[in-house]
Amino acid sequence: MLNIKIKRIDDRFNDLPLPNYSSEGSAGMDIYAAVEQPEIIEPGGVALIPTALSIALEDGYECQVRSRSGLAIKNGIFALNSPGTIDSDYRGEIKIILANFGKEPFVINRGDRIAQLVVARYEKVKWDLVEELPNTKRGEGGFGSTGLNNL
């Protein structure tokens, strides 16, 4: 298991849980809204929701911010720029960009689970500029070129 340093940056929200897994098999950890007053996101609106947390990741890791499926299907609430990336050298507050694609205003209350965090390893790359790429069966086919089903 990977240990990650996490810091509370606003004492008013010390009662909120740290990001945590909702079930044994969860890949994403729920993260909570650190708002004093309800935040209303109107249909078509976007809001930046604070969490009162910052983290220190080791080099070679990122923390991805993803939508919660229940908020998406039931209310049309999505984490924009999803998956968003918290880089290993970022030490500021984690803030979640939420957008309301639903038909009704949506209220974010203190302590609501607003997104998921997934910590992932990544590799740094060095580009090797070449004149030709190796051929594959697929080639340049993209954007639906493999069809809708395999039946």
Image: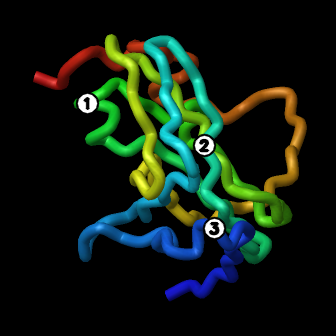
In the rendered image, residue 41, in percent from the top left (x then y), is placed at: 49, 25
* Front position in the image: 15 or 102: 15
Q: Compare marks 1 and 3 and give the one earlier in the sequence.
A: 3
Which residue is denoted by mark 2 in the rendering? 49
Q: Compare marks 3 and 2 and give the one earlier in the sequence.
A: 3
Q: Residues within 10 Å of mark 2 (few under 14, many from 20)?
A: some
Give the residue type at disc 2: Ile
Could you tell me which residue is drawn at 41 percent across and 17 percent down?
Answer: 101
Q: Secondary structure at mark 2?
A: strand
Could you tell me which residue is drawn at 79 percent across and 72 percent down?
Answer: 59
Tell me if residue 98 comes above or below residue 151 in the rendering.
below
Could you tell me which residue is drawn at 35 percent across and 24 percent down?
Answer: 76
Tally of numbered tags: 3
In the rendered image, residue 97, in percent from the top left (x then y), is placed at: 60, 36
State yes or no: discs 1 and 3 in contact (Cβ < 8 Å).
no
Which residue is denoted by mark 1 in the rendering? 73
Q: Nearer the viewer, mark 3 or mark 2?
A: 3
Q: Residues within 10 Å of mark 3 (few under 14, many from 20)?
A: few
Which residue is denoted by mark 3 in the rendering? 12
Q: Residues within 10 Å of mark 1 (few under 14, many from 20)?
A: few
